[in-house]
């Protein structure tokens, strides 16, 4: 498979992943949405199904959709290291496209939410519901684009992302490779989607389970660039954790596989 084929496949697959995953976050967040306040279970299943859709679409390239998975597979020997930057590039571009499409799909809801006096009062802490010291760090719609911790503790947050990503990548590596040798097959994609749901329900509470560097970084960049009124900050002080943590977790998972299962 050519580098251009890999890049295009990963771009489209990751765009669908982020469109559907970010879409469920938007659906649960906005008051003018039929899924408003559907809760964490809806988000966990929504992200799992987003992984499934993206994986089927990007099956040609192995459907990594995640640099942590790419790293794990490279350590396992499923892909050449020379292909890693191509996967990374497609994954990052796709994540940004997906986040942009979420904004288009919920354009009216974004405008209504960010001009709602009640929402702005809560975000700014004027009603006593939000910690005023924490409010400037993340805007009122940043959670639709990127993850954030419930308790801001860098060591714990990083550890949570590493542990959750190890679970994800180990599961993927032990499913076996598809016929093209670059990722899991169709049944494997379904099982990975269920693993993502499980991680969300069990380990997603502390940080929102980024477990994918581009899932967080690409949409966070889009949040910073979009002309959203009253959008607040993009919380760049936290942004390194859902990037570095999953990369470390993917590498550790690849090492564990080589030692314990290869």
Image: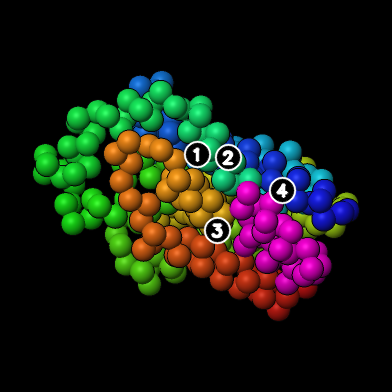
Residue visible at 61% across and 53% down in the picture: 92
For the record, the magenta segment spans 66-93
Name the quadrant containing residue 225.
top left
Residue 213's disc is 3
Residue 165: assigned label: none
Which element carries disc 2, helix, strand or loop? helix
Is 76 inside the magenta-drawn segment? yes
Q: Give coordinates of residue 121: x percent, y percent.
A: 17, 37
Q: Nearer the viewer, residue 27 or 42?
A: 27
Disc 4 target residue: 10
Q: How many angstroms separate mark 2 from mark 4 (CA)?
A: 12 Å
Whole-Å distance between the Cαs marked 4 and 3?
Answer: 14 Å
Residue underneath mark 2: 98
Label 2 neighbour load within 10 Å: few <14, some 14-19, many 20+? many
Q: Secondary structure at mark 1?
A: helix
Magenta includes 228? no
Q: Element type at marker 3?
A: helix
């Amino acid at each position: 498979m050519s580098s251009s084929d890999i890049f295009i496949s990963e771009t489209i697959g990751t765009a669908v992943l982020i469109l559907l995953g970010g879409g469920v976050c938007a659906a649960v967040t906005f008051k003018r949405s039929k899924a408003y306040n559907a809760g964490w279970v809806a988000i966990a299943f929504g992200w799992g199904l987003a992984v499934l859709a993206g994986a089927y679409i990007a099956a040609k390239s192995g459907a990594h959709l995640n640099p942590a998975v790419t790293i794990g597979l490279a350590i396992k020997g499923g892909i050449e290291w020379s292909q890693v930057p191509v996967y990374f590039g497609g994954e990052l571009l796709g994540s940004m496209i997906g986040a942009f499409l979420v904004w288009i799909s919920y354009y009216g809801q974004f405008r209504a939410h960010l001009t709602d006096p009640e929402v702005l009062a809560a975000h700014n802490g004027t009603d006593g519901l939000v910690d005023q010291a924490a409010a400037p760090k993340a805007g009122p719609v940043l959670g639709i684009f990127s993850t954030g911790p419930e308790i801001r503790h860098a060591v714990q947050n990083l550890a949570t992302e590493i542990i959750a990503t190890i679970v994800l990548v180990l599961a993927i590596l032990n499913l076996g490779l598809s016929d093209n040798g670059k990722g899991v097959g169709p049944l494997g994609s379904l099982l990975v989607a269920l693993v993502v749901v499980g991680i969300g329900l069990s380990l997603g509470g502390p940080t929102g389970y980024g477990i994918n560097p581009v899932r967080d970084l690409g949409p966070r960049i889009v949040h910073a660039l979009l002309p959203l009124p009253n959008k607040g900050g993009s919380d760049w002080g936290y942004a390194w954790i859902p990037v570095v943590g999953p990369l470390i977790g993917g590498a550790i998972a690849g090492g564990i596989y080589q030692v314990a299962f290869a």
